[in-house]
Image (cartoon, helix red, strand yellow):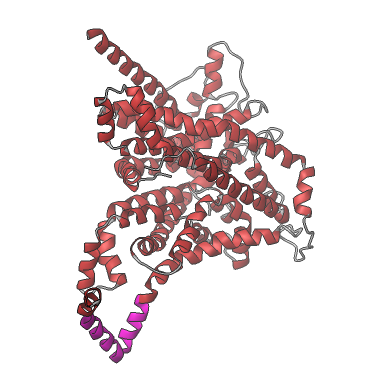
Amino acid sequence: MDSQRLGSYASKWSLHIVLIVICLATVFPFLWMFSTMLKPADEIFTKDIQILPRTLEWANFSRALDIFPVLRWTWNSFGLSIIITAGKLLISVPAAYAFSRLHFRFKPLLFAVVLVTMIVPGVVTTVPNYVMINHFGWLNTWIGVIIPSLPGTAFYVFLLRQNMMTLPQELVDAGRVDGAGTYRILWDIIIPNVKPTIAVVTILSFLGAWNQYLWPLLVLSGFENRTLATGMPFFTGNAESAQMWGPMMATAAMAALPPLIVYAIFQKQIINAFVTSGIKG
Amino acid sequence: MENTSASLPTIARPRQHERVHVAHISLAGRIGKQMESLAPYMLLLPLVSLILLFVYWPLVYSFYLSFFDWNFVTANKPFVGFDNFTRMWNDRRFLESLNGTWKYFVILVPIQVFLPLGLALMLWPIRKSRMQNTYRFVLFSPTVIAYSVAAVLWLWIFNPLQGVLNKVLIDFGFERINWLSDPDVAIWSIVIVASWKTIGFHLLLYLAALEAVPTDVIEAASIDGASNWETMKSIRFPLITPTFFFVLVTTVISVNDDVFGAINVLTDGGPFNSTSNIVYYLYEQGFVFFQIGSASAVSVIVFIATALLTWVQFRFGERFVHYG
């Protein structure tokens, strides 16, 4: 009895130890980023490993701003992400409502049209879309980044639809009796009842837009127009700034912190959405 | 006498009649009714039209573009038939990128499918401990940052002279490794970054699936005297096979697309094209060499290959997936 309990304790502890080691390895690149961005140059280039900065050097941030328009990139990242998120909600919520609660012809076909986009690799549409955007005169404009990014919502439509399907029909019927039409019901009854899922979709699409890489990299050229994610390669592309690890890590932190903070705050909601949506393949 | 079934609609009829009557009078009401029947289509119009314009049309358009020799700038596009499709088989860079694509498949698919499953099975027994939240938070954190940012963090770690990894190696008496410029090593560096970046998401899916297994099933099994491992093997595992299948399908589809960000920032496909894959080759043809026709031909091939892979997986996946 006792030895059995001891054994289960031991196995539990060894499990924790293994997990702690894996977690330390996972979190190390972040810790190293924070450590490097706060070190003066002579502490960055040392012979031995120096884990923590001896003196906190915030000058890496102002130096990053001197080399590249990092504040402008931050502004572009926020602006584009907010507009793309709003746009995605605006098109995916009504679509999920139609797919979950309304009856109409071609519903299975249209749903398939939406879902199949999930298996189209993004890179396949990049070349023709680039040619098209150029044709529209949208190169180097926000609209050229935003509009082609909007259709990437199949997963969100799916999440919202799953949630909307679970709402009881009586709720909708009560609205009908009160004389509410299809649109009213969406606004007054459906949306208030799926707010948590809408919140999750908002968070996920914000993260997605903030981290978008290839498409804005191609559409937005020039120093000023880039976002934080697409501006990072400027550091590595230039022999001089490629050695400025302090400012580079400071910029990386500015790009990494907003999504990390959003994730830290909403971790529970994000995980719950996956659990309740019943993703079963 | 069949009235029993017909009587139900007659009760509802007066109200409907009233509405029709009102619609006769006001034009607004008539339009309103029209709008009501069109509502589903109106609600879908923005999404579906954007999808048609920016996902389906580009597929057709890239097929069209693949028949021309065009450098994006000149006005004339000479028609070259299937030349773009045949020429690439003589292109060394293309063949090397195919080799890379294959390597990423073989190395990364097992890592991205089984490692998170293993982690999920380790985290599951301690789900009631507060530490589980911390572990989960840490393991998922790399997935929320941009690929380019992740790549820059690792660029610093992999740096041959000042990077922390080589400093550790030298401290322990090993030789310095050229993580990104040695053609035999570079692909493994990309694999490390890609695994670091994507494992957290799959872990979350597996944990969600484990959580969704009804507890009464597990209790019934343990009352019957099944051991932990037995319940895991015979109950929990069959119930999470749909998630396993989902992870497998999405990994196979997206793995070569996913590593693009890491390749682009860390190695640019080098050294000697050793870290390139078909997605990077496509990007290179289109946006480095501006060979739109050849890039479009690669797009077509990638799309057809993806569709085939998905179909094959669904065809054979159905056999072992238990939809409960």
Q: Is residue B184 visible?
A: yes
Magenta-colored segment: predominant secondary structure: helix
Q: Quadrant of residue A62?
A: top left
Tell me which residue sits at (48%, 46%) in the image. A228
* Depth order, front residue of A56/B188: B188
The answer to whether residue B242 is above or below residue A94 is above
Q: Is residue A150 visible?
A: no
Q: Locate residue A248, reporting x and y percent.
A: 51, 37
Q: Is residue B5 magenta?
A: no
Tell me which residue sits at (50%, 37%) in the image. B150
Which region is colored magenta? B13-36
Q: Is residue A125 left or right of residue B240?
A: right
Q: Locate residue B200, reporting x and y percent.
A: 42, 35
Q: Residue furthest top?
A: A3
The answer to whether residue B270 is above or below residue A274 is above
Q: Locate residue A169, reporting x and y percent.
A: 25, 62
Q: Quadrant of residue B232?
A: top left
